[in-house]
Image: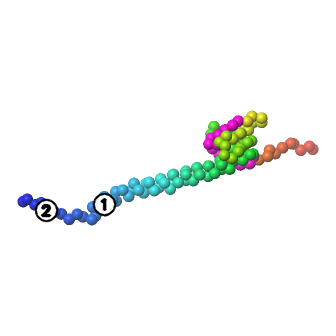
Amino acid sequence: MLISPAYAQDFSSTFASYGQFLPIILIFAVFYFLLIRPQQQQQKTLKARLAAVKRNDRVVTGGGIIGIVVKAQDGQSEIEVEIATGVKVKVLRETITAVLGEPTPANDTKPAKA
């Protein structure tokens, strides 16, 4: 026999070869919607809040220092933050990890006179 018999290709075997990629695609979709996309949205909101930082906002730096913004100019990367009474430091906008908003005024709780 010089000619070998030709067999028809089965359609189900072709579908099965593509079907083995389905779990990988599903895993990527789950990672995208549960991990990647929320992180991107969080970074976008933080970037918008950093651009809108103004005087008297409470901020948290990357080192965990909480302070009040004393001087912040649009377009500049340096912000002056007061971390204690009379102690001012300059930090980069990119090192701020959270903007806490306006500071709450301290309530003077003096004991009532009887």
Residue 44 shown in magenta: no
Which SS class for mark 1? helix
Q: Position of residue 7 (x, y in %)?
A: 18, 63
Q: Position of residue 109 (x, y in %)?
A: 84, 43
Which mark is drawn over residue 16? Answer: 1
Q: Residue at x 62, y 41 (%)?
A: 95
- Which of the image's four quarters has the N terminus? bottom left
Residue 62 horizontal side relative to residue 109, left or right: left
Residue 20 horizontal side relative to residue 9, left or right: right
Q: Main secondary structure of the magenta part?
A: strand
Residue 34 horizontal side relative to residue 21, left or right: right
The total number of labels drawn is 2
Q: Position of residue 44 (x, y in %)?
A: 59, 52
- Which of the image's four quarters has the C terminus? top right
Q: Residue at x 75, y 45 (%)?
A: 56
- Work out whether residue 32 or residue 79 is closer to the camera in this orientation and state it: 79
Residue 68 in view of the camera: no
- Work out whether residue 3 or residue 7 is closer to the camera in this orientation and state it: 3
Amino acid residing under circle 1: Ala
Read off the magenta span: 89-103
Residue 90 shown in magenta: yes
Reply above or below: 72 against 17: above
Residue count near mark 1 (Cα–Cα under 10 Å), binned few <14, some 14–19, many ≥20: few
Toward the left, the furthest residue is 1
Amino acid residing under circle 2: Pro
Which SS class for mark 2? loop
If you read the primary sequence from the N terminus, does the residue marked by circle 2 or circle 1 appear first? 2
Q: Residue at x 61, y 52 (%)?
A: 45
Which mark is drawn over residue 69? Answer: none
The image quadrant of residue 72 is top right
Which mark is drawn over residue 5? Answer: 2
